[in-house]
Image: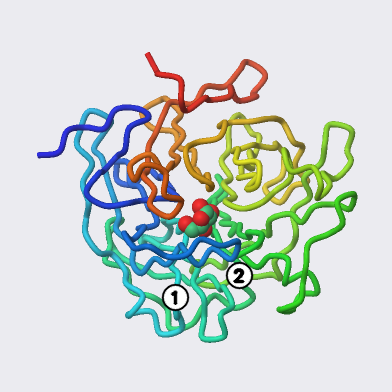
Amino acid sequence: MTKPAKPNEPLVTHMYTADPSAHVFEGKLYIYPSHDLDHAMTSNDNGDQYDMEDYHILSMDDFHSPCVDHGEALHLRDIPWAKQQLWAPDAAYKNGLYYLYFPARDEDDIFRIGVATSSSPAGPFVPEPNPIPKSYSIDPAVFVDDDNKAYLYFGGLWGGQLEKWQSGTFDPEGDGPAADAPAFGPRVAELSEDMLTVIETPQEISILDEEGNPLVAGDEERRYFEGPWVHKFNDYYYLSYSTGTTHTIVYAMSRNPKGPYVYKGIILTPVVGWTTHHSIVSFQGKWYLFYHDSSLSGGADNKRCVKYTELHYNDDGTIQTIDPHRPTD
Ligand code: FUB
């Protein structure tokens, strides 16, 4: 039997995992990661090296229990509209059903977001025949608020194609803004009651500095790149995300799930590997950060491993910065 994973150690070592979205379902921790494959793809800014084909769901009764791999929960071959690249997923629960949200490239090589359903948090999941209408780009994250409204967040630069959607339709020539222009923000749209469609055109989220000015595209230490995650603590919404080129997980706060959000600081300093991607979850009275790095493969960007560590708030609601290389007590 596998031993329980310690903080900052791989949750599992029998396969490569990345992009962990952690949730508490049925009293247990469920982790929805990408499943990195052990192949040698050429690395480029388009993300061709992330050529994943299926999802495996992990769970733990608690942090003293071994992490269970529930096997293949969804495969590319079973998704009618998807051609390749099953990237970072997320999951949600509503109305007695579990929903798995995932990005993939369609037949035209355009990233869209799909949804699949299951009666169990561990799957298997059955995909809808088409992607979610009006969805695009990558890294879906779903937040279900206390009033039961659910929101779909998404978007990623470079290989994630967010630059190509600035006119509202896909423009293959679409590019990023000038360094002194407002950076592109992630997108948000409220989900329908059945969680399978959005009920509005996705809108861009503004991320502002403390003076109320939008973060600019050249501010690579703070501007949005990919991997949105929204959680709520003490009536504040926290939008956390990867800064991509500067390799940190940072966060911004708002009183409204759709923003505008005000930038606050760094949650996670750079890990081993180019990408960084996370989720934040409350479990048994404590808060945890799930994240990945490339340590299990000795640094290969597309062979990553999922880890966790405890997350702490300051009295004013700000989050203490985590250094993944510092041993925990
Ligand atoms: O795993 C593929 C991509 O790498 C994800 O969608 C991004 O967030 C980055 O982690």
Query: Where residue 236 sits in the image (x, y, percent)?
Result: 66, 34
On screen, residue 75 above or below 142: below
Query: Where residue 182 sits in the image (x, y, percent)?
Result: 85, 52
Quarter-of-image position of residue 133:
bottom right
Q: How many marks?
A: 2
Q: Real-space Cα distance between discs 1 and 2?
A: 23 Å
Which is more N-terminal, label 2 or label 1?
1
Quarter-of-image position of residue 318:
top right
Taking depth in this image into account, of 49 and 125 the one nearest to the observer is 49
Determine which residue is flagged by label 2.
Answer: 198
Determine which residue is flagged by label 1.
Answer: 84
Query: Where residue 54 sits in the image (x, y, percent)?
Result: 33, 67
Q: Is mark 1 within 8 Å of ligand 1?
A: no
Q: Secondary structure at mark 1?
A: strand
User: In which quadrant is the N terminus drawn?
Assistant: top left
User: In which quadrant is the C terminus drawn?
Assistant: top left
Label 1 neighbourhood size at 10 Å, few (<14), some (14-19), many (20+)? Answer: many
Q: Residue at x 71, y 70 (%)?
A: 201
On screen, residue 149 above or below 66: below
Q: Does residue 83 appear to the left or right of 154 in the view shown?
A: left
Q: Secondary structure at mark 2?
A: loop
Q: Are marks 1 and 2 in contact (CB under 8 Å)?
A: no
Q: Residue at x 90, y 49 (%)?
A: 180
Quarter-of-image position of residue 6:
top left
- Specify the amino acid type for callout 2: Val
- Specify the amino acid type for callout 1: Gln
Q: Is residue 142 visible?
A: no
Q: Residue at x 27, y 57 (%)?
A: 122
Q: Is mark 2 within 8 Å of ligand 1?
A: no
Q: Does residue 236 appear to the left or right of 291 in the view shown?
A: right
Query: Where residue 87 sits in the image (x, y, percent)?
Result: 46, 62
